[in-house]
Image (cartoon, rainbow, N blue to C red):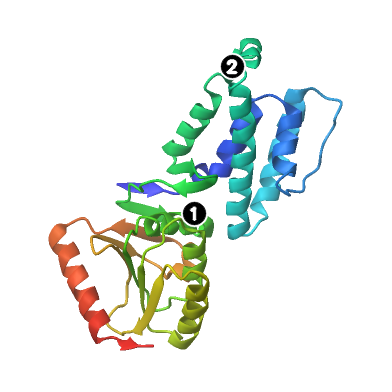
Amino acid sequence: MSKNISDEFDPFRVVVSFASEADNADWFFETFSGIGLRFDLGDDNSSHRNRIRALSPRVLEAYESLSQEAKLAAANSATGSFLSRIQQLEQNPNYLKKFPQFQGFSDRMLKNFQKIGWGFQDDRLVTLEPQIREMFFPKDSQWDAFVVIRGIIEKAKSELMVVDPFCDREIFTILQTSSARPKMVRLLCRNKPDDLKAEAKKFCEQHSEMCIEVRTSSDFHDRFLVVDQATCIHIGASINHAGSRAFMISAVEDKSNRDALIKVVNEAWTTGVPV
């Protein structure tokens, strides 16, 4: 079954939706201006509902202008800020008596996150178990691709193998923003391995809990992620360009194909040239 990734999978939009539902323009403004977004403030003299209606598209426009990494930071900050405010109010019985609509408000928001594959743990957004069979990404869906690939990588508990002929520093951006800290990361590439090794060395100096090895091989054309020698994901584009053009991500579900792929990947690693 194909699944089309679109803006509805962006947790920031969930925060905007619930901040709008709270029907308090001051909270809305403080939530999004407080994380550094710049947008037109609108008319302070109009009603809360009208102010929020005017501010929402401006907030989303400011958010869309950010880089991928900045979007994640903005979504994290906005979620933490708004959830903290709501959870404090939920603990005030006098407030809930006056505004019963806020009873269970934060739980409902978190459940909406879960519906699109997100959770909020330890003051940060995390991707939940991805139900990947086949996912289609249209052209210019770089952010969605980044999020899904990071979600796959976050499932690595002990080992991650990246098979990508054109693997580059983008993999370290994903590892940096991921909650996963596998002990071993193996990068099997073909293009510019010396640059990749230098980047890996610097990354490991800061993240000593991980060991990253780089080897080259010309055995593969396609790109794969192998997680803990058990899960295999086929990626139809190099990770550094994923989403710039239409492509697909799919799980290798057939056991015989999965076992064969893991075997060949391990053999290619063994015979690959250490960098």
Residue extending farthest to the front is 208
Label of residue 101 in the image:
2
Direction from residue 260 to residue 167 in the image, left or right: right
Direction from residue 254 to residue 101 in the image, left or right: right
Residue type at tag 1? Asp
Going from N to C along the chain, the mark reached first, 1 or 2, is 2
**Residue 223 placement (x, y as % from top left):** 34, 70
Place residue 51 in its image quadrant: top right
Residue visible at 79% across and 22% down?
Answer: 47
Q: Which image quarter is the C terminus in?
A: bottom left
Q: Nearer the viewer, residue 204 or 224?
A: 204
Secondary element at tag 1: helix
Place residue 97 in its image quadrant: top right
Q: Nearer the viewer, residue 106 or 242?
A: 106
Q: Is residue 34 visible?
A: yes
**Residue 27 placement (x, y as % from top left):** 72, 31
Residue extending farthest to the top is 97
Secondary element at tag 2: helix
Q: Is 268 drawn above or below residue 230 in the view shown? A: below
Q: Is 140 drawn above or below residue 270 in the view shown? A: above
Q: Is 117 drawn above or below residue 18 in the view shown? A: below
**Residue 113 placement (x, y as % from top left):** 48, 38
Residue visible at 47% across and 58% down?
Answer: 178
Callout 1: 10 Å neighbours few (<14), some, many (20+)? many
Callout 2: 10 Å neighbours few (<14), some, many (20+)? few
Residue that carries the numbered disc 1 in the rendered image: 144
Residue type at tag 2? Gln
Direction from residue 119 to residue 189 in the image, left or right: left
Query: Mark 1 or mark 2: which is in front?
Result: 2
Q: Nearer the viewer, residue 109 or 142?
A: 109
**Residue 233 placement (x, y as % from top left):** 30, 61
